[in-house]
Amino acid sequence: MPARPQLTRAARPATITISATNERGEAVPTQIAGEHPLTLYLDKREIVTLMTLGGAPEALAIGYLRNQRLVSRLEDIAAVQVDWETDSVAVTTIRSADDLEERMGKRTVTTGCGQGTMFGDLMEDIDKVALPAEVCLDEDTLYGLLDAVRQHESIYKQAGAVHGCALARGTRILMFVEDIGRHNAVDAIAGQMWLDGLTGEDKIFYTTGRLTSEMVIKTAQMGIPFLVSRSGLTQMGYDLAQRVGMTMIGRSQGKHYLLFTGAERFTRRTPTSFDTESTETQRTQREISR
């Protein structure tokens, strides 16, 4: 495992309690999601200001730099220091990217919650990603993961207003991160994967957000072949998933899903006689109700 940088431990509470008034005029204690600006500095150079819950600011900063290709190895990071008095995180490197100025000049702001960003030649570099072809995901595992996500304790259940992402091996959730924007949640998981020395070839990435081009790029950069969402997808997300050979599944809730790309890695459950009878019964009931 690579040497870990010096880290602060500056997580903030994910929610606060305020007083709201309901439809009957009653005061109701209500939990709401925190939101804090966090300006990221790389070797004293201001990079970006992220709006975040503040639950994992160090991992968020590391994952952001990783996914934007501004730092190529965890060993290059000497320290990550979060200071909430100045709403800033300072990342000090042993060796920063030689082409940092060029990459900053090619910054593209993408749409969506939390406004993601893409730097430099990420679109061109996507063709260098090689996802494992031999791993598979079966339908029962997908259903088990969706059920595990549903049962997971979350800030969304308490306060709403957040997106969530999970890293899983099979049906086991290894990490679950929520933040104001789905991009922050992805970056925090990417950063924690680096810190924990985890690779992505046998993992599944789940997100509550849309399957956009940036979500596909970040998942591919983490080496994860499976991307699952309860939401839909964009055309560029679809095109890029096909381009890198990613298995992408959307509209996933309960026993429903849509397999968009990478069908060669996905195995559907063989229907049993009970499944067939149940389906026929449902069809008959629908016809009767008409």
Image (spheres, rainbow, N blue to C red):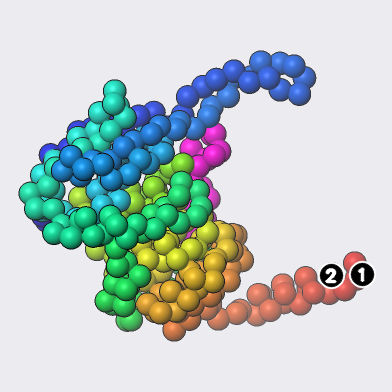
Residue at the spot 39% in from the left edge and 47% down from the top edge: 184
Q: Quadrant of residue 71?
A: bottom left
Q: Which residue is mark 2?
A: 286
Q: Main secondary structure of the magenta part?
A: helix
Q: Which mark is residue 290?
A: 1
Residue at the spot 58% in from the left edge and 68% down from the top edge: 257
Tell me the SS state at disc 2: helix
- The magenta span reads 145-164
Q: Nearer the viewer, residue 262 or 203?
A: 262
Is residue 286 in view? yes
Q: Is residue 284 left or right of residue 5?
A: right
Quarter holding the C terminus is bottom right
The number of discs equals 2
Across and down, in percent, residue 235 comes to: 54, 71
Image marks 1 and 2: residues in contact by CB distance under 8 Å? yes
CA separation in Å, label 1 and label 2: 7 Å
Across and down, in percent, residue 14 comes to: 42, 32
